[in-house]
Image (cartoon, rainbow, N blue to C red):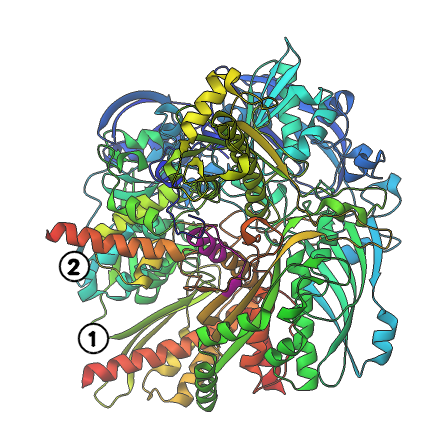
Amino acid sequence: MKPAPFDYYAPSTLEEVLALLGQHGDEAKLLAGGQSLMPLINMRLARPAVLVDINRLPGLDYIREDDGMIAIGALTRHASVASSNVLKKSCPMLPHAAQFVGDLQVRNRGTFGGSIAHADPASEFCAVVYTLGGEIVARHAGGSRVIPVEEFFEAPLTTALTPREIATEVRVARIKGAAWSFRGIAPRFGDFVLAGVGIALDFDGEGRCGACRVGMFGVGPTPLRAYKAEQSCVGNRLDEKLIVELAELAATEADPSSDVHASAGYRRELLRWLVGWNLRNASRKHQEEMK
Amino acid sequence: MIGERIKRREDPRLLTGKGQYMADLVIHGMLHAALLRSPHAHARIKRIDPSGALKVPGAVAVFTGADLKQHLEPLASWYNFAGKQAPTQPHDYPLAVSKVRYMGEPVAVVVASDRYVAEDAMEQIEVEYEPLPVVVDAEEAMKENAPLLFEEAGSNIYWQGSFQYGAVEQAFAEADLVVKDKLYFHRFSSTPMEGYAILANYQSVDHSITIWGNFQSPAIFRLRIAHSLGIPMNRVRLITPPDIGGGFGLKMPLHPWAILVAFVSMKVMRPVKWVEDRLEHQAASHHGSEQTSYVEFAAKKDGTILGLRAKIIHNAGAYVHMPEPLGMVEWSHIPQGCYRFRNVAMECYSVLTNKCPVAPNRGYGRMQHQFLIERMMDRVAQELKMDPVDLRLKNFIRPEEFPYESTNGALYDSGQYAACVHKAQETLDWERWKKEQAKAREQGRYIGLGLVSIMDPGVTNMAMVGLFDKSLKMSTTGEAASLTIDPSGTITVLTGSWGQGHETTCAQVVAYEFGIPFEDVYVVPGIDTATHPVAGSSGTYASRFAAMASGALQGAAAELKEKMIRIAAHLWRTDAEKLEFSEGKVREKGGAGKFMPLAQLAALATYSPAKLPPGVKPGMESTFIYNYPKANEMDDSGRANFAATYANVVHAVALEVNPHTGQYEILKYVVVHDAGTLINPLIADGQVHGAVAHSLGAAMLEEFIYNDEGQLLNGSWVDYLCPKATDIPDIEVEHIVTPSPFTAYGVKGMGEGSGPVPALLAQALEDALSPLKQFRITWSRHTPEKVLSMLREARAG
Amino acid sequence: MTRHIITVTVNGTLYTREMDARKLLSDFIREDLGLTGTHLGCEHGQCGTCTILFNGVSMKSCLLLATQADGAKIMTVEGLAKDGVLHPLQESFWEHHGLQCGFCTPGMLMNALYFLTVNPRPTDLEIRRGIAGNLCRCTGYVNIVKAIKAAAEKMAQNKGA
């Protein structure tokens, strides 16, 4: 199919973008990489009256460490995330996750800000930011605000952004010294996952778990955290018995649904196994680093 | 020349973007069509108001089913060849008339200045539907109280027939063991990269129409297109462009859309083009057949299979488009698979449901039958605690039994089935994997091995249509070719050329026949019914082209060589017996004496007819229509040689199951293939790779999923999962060559021999999980979720 | 609907054209420039058939608007062979029978071309992952993987020489 008609603007300043959004409100749609939006437009499932292309905005393509966090400009392409040395050093879970996002062409065009703002519940990038913690910088005509990631994702493809706002930067918490693991299971390589898990863990000198973050994706309306499992983890040794308990606990915290690719029950089973696998993997990585 | 791995001559144009596919064709003044399609699976059309569409600037016209019914004959069925009509036929038009019967069925066509505008206009057509009860399951549709798709027909059973060969009752009475199962073969399709496309240009001055389309078989459908349009057949010109973006059988039933676009061109007096997009193709082109089978196998204790009894139910979808319902009787090519049992009873039902109509799809109808046979072989092996490979070896037809007339008259030409099995085991390194498997089991890992052996029949003998109506007496398997030698000595070939390397392989055959350089033979790309000769069943389908075209080319070449010998004998005042054709010239036998190159002979025949011997016609051109010599008519007991060649394929696999997720990884995949003489092994290997990928996709990923309301739930390529490069393993291909005794050069059809892959994976998965439990997999798509549920079941005890 | 005038370089030729806002880059390349080597397999970003190089980087042209190409340098399959000499990738696809119907081939070539710039000596698995955004329904990918691998070796040799 071919797109329905729309007006198109490609402003070169943020002010113009915000003015257009102010003028057209929810009639307008921001076009970043377009790797999720354009298919919907082509199929006439999305029919914005106005398309505001932000690809010509300068200065939104960057990855830098900033005040203990890593700041990623909204127009940073997935390919830059995948190959960033800053991220490989300070936030390796992100470039690792990037290799499973779509495919080579998608990574060449898709933007980090676009992925986050699109808020697919099975998105790797949403999952990593949600797991590690972070915030989204949103600009509107009157100024800007910072939205903690916990408040950002509201429902599938729905965020806290208003139609007159644009996300300009995503900040991811830098978790020093944490062992991490990330794995999802998708029907095919690069597809959205049926279930996925990201984990960041600290260990104290005695080998007990310190801070623990267990993120889950593809198993609920938004990315999720397995808070109960996290709490049960802290202060304990990560032995096989505990791992099984944590996996069970996390599975109760997921909220998967059924579709043509998998039933909710299967997603939950995958999730249970993935929590265990990732805990073991993180623990193994930690022990290797200790050696 | 025959048997050489020659690089394809089609490739340079395809590699440089110079291919000519349907979407690339442009005619001055051309309009673009878009089809409005039904969102409902079953509904009465109460009202269509197209007025809004015509207000869209650039929109030219709108037509509905009512317009078609007024002006056209309904779509053809096989019954028309016997002067009869199918019960559903009066209602079958390219656009829905008064009722829609599947989601995606076209209800109106819009033509406009471009496709964007046509879609804008399409959205402005108002249709009021009254939804009707929906039936998507074939067995439900057979019940008395089921909603009827065609009320006037009184039943959703389009066709039913029973066939019995051998002494079936006796075989089951004498059996030590009877195994029974209900098997389900799911709905998928090869979804070629390029959808359907038609460009029609009507000329009112002489009431003629030219229709370009990515037709796989213009020969079969030309008569029927002409009939529906009410244009004499000789004024209906069908052209297939040089390049088609994959067909896989699905592009056989293109006629509904050819007729529709032609009709629109006639009405608006402009060339009109329609290019099906992906969403249209997935929902509403055609799907492969879905089959439920109730099967019984009779066996002796020692593993000798005695017979097969099956009730098979095809979910045909909402309409039966030719060549359907042939899928229903394609088992007739291979009634008993590779095995010696001769007692076969088939009870067949072609059932209408509110799903997309079905069509040939690589392995048409045979996949389903092979799945059935190979699954039941495994069931017998399980029951008798025999090795499944040993059971197959025990029951194979032996090499010395060929040519082997099977129980329904299918004349298996040649084969060495056991040799293929041994080679497959050797290539896979079966024994090593057995050891790996044992080791893995000790570690709680699950490796499974599988091996199946099937026929890959080539060429359809149209006698097969007699199976569903005895009054249809056909026997064509034909293919046609014309060769012209020009006065410069180069040769032009006109025959069907539809991709798959036909330009290359036909040139190889002709170069071989005349002993001239490959470069001196030009095969005109594509096919045009105004210039190309066609036979009754010309086309690229049923793995027929290589075997049949080589017969036509060989025949035409023989005629020309004989003619040239006669001319030379006349000129040299010698006896034709003393001459021979060799290395591009006529010469005295042995080659030491006089000779005359073919350029000179062609020039003479072209420019100097007075020099020709009496009775020899001017020119150096021959058209030859080849029909397979063993293609007979069906007899009254339903017996005929329903195919022509009977290749054999063995697939072997080692896979490992992840016991936690149900995912499985293919560790090694081997195919041993015997399609007789291979014209070009490079191309043959590619066909095998493609066939395996096609079936692995089906066995692992691909399925059209409908809900109870008849809504297709995965109608885009986001959700319908074609295998990616990361899903298909490396495929090791070996060949054994057992030439056909009946075809030119011993060539057999090939490229569809992947039907058993769903059975192969089932066998290997059962083997992998056998330490836990002996499973009976009765379905054809093996999702990790299903595998995990088996593991769960096994663990629960 | 807004209309737009763009100037774009395609295979080294500069074009200035006017179009509707909604015109997809893929349709623009095929219809307005007549470069029909770029094919459409799905028009929703799943098959990769329409892949081109956009400022040197592989992208799916059905997911771009023609207006977005203003000022860009684009390369399509027609730009791959130089002066009638096939690119090593084209040669290798030919040699290894890495194509059958040829419909996916242009997109496959363009993505492989970019892939080899970021990974000049790939493993089989890396190749498979690299072309996971390009569907092929004919070849089972077996010979495509071989062709890309062989081309990589050839291109590395050419570079070394």
The answer to whether residue B238 of the structure is visible from this angle is yes
Residues at discs 2 and 1 both on one chain: yes
User: What are the residue bounds of the magenta stretch?
Assistant: B672-690
In which quarter of the view is residue A232 placed? bottom left
Q: Is residue A194 above or below residue B430?
A: above
Residue A65 x, y percent position in the rendering: 16, 59
Q: Is residue A260 above or below residue B394?
A: above
Q: Is residue C81 left or right of residue B13?
A: left
Q: Is residue B327 left or right of residue C1?
A: right
Residue B685 magenta = yes
Write the residue at 42% across / 72% down.
A226
Residue under circle 1? A177
Q: How many labels, in total?
A: 2
Q: Tell me the crowding category of disc 1: few under 14, some 14 to 19, or many 20 or more residues within 10 angstroms, Cα based.
A: few
Discs 2, 1 touching: Cβ within 8 Å: no
Q: Which residue reaches farthest top?
A: B205
| Circle 1 SS class | loop
Query: Any mark on residue A65, and which?
Result: 2
In which quarter of the view is residue B622 placed? top right
**Earlier along the polypeptide chain: callout 2 or callout 1?**
2
The answer to whether residue A251 of the structure is visible from this angle is no
Q: Looking at numbered disc 2 in the image, what kind of residue is underneath it?
A: Glu
Residue C145 magenta = no
